[in-house]
Image: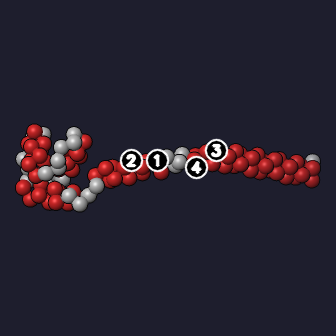
Amino acid sequence: MRTMEYIYAALLLHRAGKPVDEENVKKVLSAAGVNPDEARVKSLVAALSEVNIDEVLKSATAMPAVAAPAPAPEAEKKPEKKEEKKKEEKKEEEKEEALAGLSALFG
């Protein structure tokens, strides 16, 4: 099913300031080399008649801005790596001290 072409046609018409009606959607689809399906065109136009396309586009473009803070956890990972290195260094020191203690017993 090729549904996205119909949506793109409607968005293109909206962006161009043309009415999103059956005739215009069919023209855009035909110009793009898509054989328009009457039922799909009618259902698209009917569904979009109750939708404020500008509001939908605003909410869709606002979503990536909400997702933008995602890189912050990487910044948190870096201190963890430092902490892990410190823990490993402490373990190494403890092992060296333990070995030193053992060598003193048998030394």
Q: Is residue 89 visible?
A: yes
Which amino acid lies under the numbered mark 1 shown in the image of this protein?
Answer: Ala
Per the image, label 3 sits on a secondary structure element best described as helix
Out of 33 and 86, give the one closest to the viewer: 33
Which amino acid lies under the numbered mark 2 shown in the image of this protein?
Answer: Thr
Residue placed under numbered mark 4 in the picture? 73
Mark 3 or 2, nearer chain start: 2
Mark 4 or 2, nearer chain start: 2
Q: Is residue 49 left or right of residue 74?
A: left
Per the model, the C-alpha gap separating discs 4 and 1 is 16 Å
Eye-nearest disc, 4 or 3: 4
Residue at (17, 47) in percent of width and height:
19
Eye-nearest disc, 3 or 1: 1
Residue placed under numbered mark 2 in the picture? 61
Residue at (64, 44) in percent of width and height:
78
Eye-nearest disc, 3 or 2: 2
Per the model, the C-alpha gap separating discs 3 and 2 is 31 Å
Mark 2 and mark 1 in contact? Answer it, CB < 8 Å.
yes
Residue placed under numbered mark 3 in the picture? 78
**Residue 85 position within the rendered picture, expressed as x and y whole percent measured from the top left:** 71, 45
**In the rendered image, which quarter is residue 34 located in?**
top left
Residue placed under numbered mark 1 in the picture? 65
Mark drawn on residue 103:
none
Q: Is residue 88 visible?
A: no
- Which corner quadrant holds the N terminus? bottom left
Mark 3 and mark 1 in contact? Answer it, CB < 8 Å.
no
Per the image, label 4 sits on a secondary structure element best described as helix
Q: Is residue 51 left or right of residue 90?
A: left
Per the model, the C-alpha gap separating discs 2 and 1 is 7 Å
